[in-house]
Image (cartoon, helix red, strand yellow):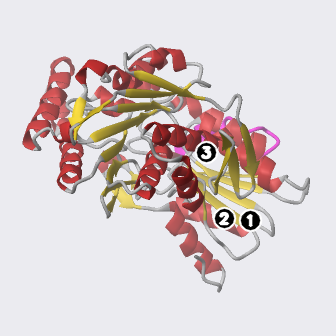
Amino acid sequence: MLNTLRKIIPSSIFTFFQPYYHKFLALLGALLYRFPSRQIIVIGVTGTKGKSTVVELVSKILREAGCKIGSSSSVQFRVGEQIWPNTFKMTMPGRFIIQRYLRMAVDDGCKYFIMEVTSEGIKQYRHWFVDFDVAVFTNIHPEHIEAHGSFENYKKAKGELFKTLDKSRQKSIDGKIIDKIAFVNSDDQESTYFLSLTNAEKITYSLQKLEYTLLKNGSTLTINNVQFTTCLLGKFNIYNALASIKICSALRVDLSVIKQALERITLIPGRMEEISSNQGFKIFVDYAHTPDSLEAVYEFLSKHIVNKDNDQSKKLICVLGATGGGRDKQKRATFGAIASKYCNEIIITNEDPYDEDPNTIMTDVASGVNKEIIPKLILDRREAIALALSLAKNNDVVIITGKGCEPWMMLEDGKKISWDDRQIVREELLKKYSNPTS
């Protein structure tokens, strides 16, 4: 509807009335579903990276503790034992959808609702009339600059979540007053900004003085002489685990329960998810779509899996692209530069072109690749994935980034096609090898 209005209304008038349109929808959604967030503890997670993982980890830990929960992330929606994949191609969906899931969670007897909160969602006032009790800041890096106009505007949008936390506006759940709490990653250089935005209780987390170990099949983290073990890969996931431990500890979940929950978590869908090949090489699918997250993924795989034994014969083979539609064009060449820093074979392909020419996007990414490496530009993403698998030999690693577990590929004029990198990998493996994959 908004896109239709944009086409028929003069741009100056549309720009003026757009905020009021979004605010009206937020109010209407809350009225329709009877302000459900007033009856449940709402945890909002924001940041550039790690939002979905923290939402899923906190959800799993609280469920391990016997709490009934609802959740909303770019991965899925949950109400009690019911799960729906997020097929909206929006991390933080529209006001009516958010309020509907909150109402379903309240009616189902859930105690907590954990929600991924995005800058674009805040820009469109989707957070209005959601009564947040806990706000979590994971980290911030330049992203969505075209949409917000500048990094400062992007940061301010994220900060709006923390401004909603007012300790004088506490709610009572089951006769108990719920404290407003802000959790902030103090290792991020913008942490003081987010801490300054609220008068709620402030809890920070940091890896600076903690013992942790990165392993090829997970990691360990020691807090208060308790060692937590997780199958999740990379330092970035240690931060996600630490945030989840801090949040759930503040919610009075026993450390032994948290430890047990983390040990039982084998993966977060589409986040450094390994796809079994039974062919002697490893395949990973990851959502990495910013320079920092892409480098973190490549660096971990290069250091801890590919080059762990200093075996120069092992290769890191990457498949990457960049989302189109005029989004964050400045990061495309950076993607290519990062890939050439860590990868032995680089395959650049289509991702979510929207209304932009995908060939232009691929060329932009390729422009940053080191001249010593000749990248392969393949428009068909399935064909690109198939090529990566065919190039992989024993002990090599294939990493496919950008989409994770997203169920759609977005094309021009709002068109979309069903897509899942993980399923495409499995299908191509079945074509190439007779052995079935898991």
Residue under label 3: 237
Residue 249: give x, y in percent of width and height. 49, 40
Q: Is tag 3's residue or tag 2's residue first in the polypeptide sequence?
A: 3
Density class for disc 1 (Cα within 10 Å; few <14, some 14-19, many ≥20) is: few
Q: What element carries label 3?
A: helix
As drawn, 367 above or below 438 = above
Q: Residue 154 carries which label?
A: none
Q: Which mark is residue 387?
A: 2
Tag count: 3
What residue is rendered at 32% in x and 46% in y? 112
Q: Can residue 211 be seen from the camera position used here?
A: yes
Q: What distance separates the C-alpha of mark 2 from that of mark 1?
A: 6 Å
Residue 371 in the magenta stretch? The answer is yes
Residue 236: give x, y in percent of width and height. 62, 41
Magenta-drawn segment: 359-373
Among all residues in the image, which is located at the extreme bottom? 434
Residue under label 1: 391
Looking at the image, residue 126 sits to the left or right of residue 278; the answer is left
Q: Which of 299 and 353 is in front in this view?
A: 299
Quarter of the rendering occupied by the N terminus:
top left
Quarter of the rendering occupied by the C terminus:
bottom right
What residue is rendered at 41% in x and 22% in y? 201
Looking at the image, residue 392 sits to the left or right of residue 141; the answer is right
What residue is rendered at 60% in x and 49% in y? 320
Identified by mark 3, the residue type is Asn
Q: What distance separates the C-alpha of mark 3 from that of mark 2?
A: 29 Å
Identified by mark 2, the residue type is Leu
Q: Which of 210 and 343 is in front in this view?
A: 210
Discs 2, 1 touching: Cβ within 8 Å: yes
Mark whose residue sits in front, 1 or 3: 3
